[in-house]
Image (spheres, rainbow, N blue to C red):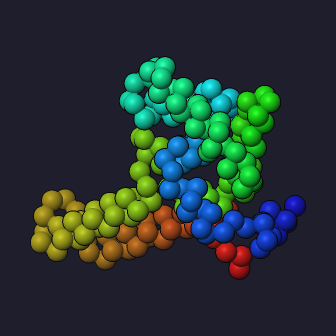
Amino acid sequence: MTVQDQTPDREDRLDPGEIHNVLRNDRRRRAIQRLRESDGPISVDALAEHIAAAETGESPPPRDVRKSVYVSLHQTHLPKLDDLGIVEYDQRDQQLELRDRAEQVEVYMEVVAEDDISWATYYLGVSLLGLVTLSAVRFDLLFVSSFGIAFWSWYFLALFALSASYHAYSERDHRLFDS
């Protein structure tokens, strides 16, 4: 399969207004995020349990909250996501899974695991570390000055180049527009 075969046609693209409408609701965002984390289809019950626990901070969540989440998912959010082609919602079996169109929405979601950092935070950290290191070299502080400013400049330039290359490679399938 070619890259062009994997890329949705222009008419198959979601309208930016539809994407905004999907993402402005916490339950829809949480549903997409949970489906991304799953290895396969999940049940509406399991999704409702997960979202209710996230909303209340309790595990297991209170029964009335779980029921409220289940009803809103079943009646409103999942049919909308299904109509837009973002999820496959089998109402008979009460099973859900992401469809290919979900990638168009995921581009706008920075889903970062709880024990992970975002790319923006990573680049900020590398920048600050580079600034502190080069300042320490300039003022002969710590052991870093023994390597010289040229070494550290090249080191951080290479670190940025390698990081940006890996970042671009890992995000290659999340392009907003066809080139």
Quadrant of the rendering where the N terminus is positioned: bottom right
Residue at 61% across, 69% down: 16
* Residue 11 position by quadrant: bottom right
Vertical position of residue 52 compared to residue 31: above or below: above
How many numbered discs sit on the rendered protein? Answer: 0
**Could you say which is closer to the camera, residue 20 or residue 163?**
20
* Residue 115 position by quadrant: top left
Is residue 36 visible in this depiction of the protein? no
**Could you say which is closer to the camera, residue 118 or residue 125?**
118
Direction right: furthest residue: 1
100 vs 115, left or right, is right
Is residue 76 visible in this depiction of the protein? yes
Q: Position of residue 43 (x, y in %)?
A: 68, 29
Residue at 58% across, 38% down: 72
Quadrant of the rendering where the C terminus is positioned: bottom right
**Could you say which is closer to the camera, residue 158 or residue 118?**
118
23 vs 57, left or right, is right
Vertical position of residue 66 compared to residue 137: above or below: above
Residue at 28% across, 62% down: 129
Q: Position of residue 142 (x, y in %)?
A: 15, 59
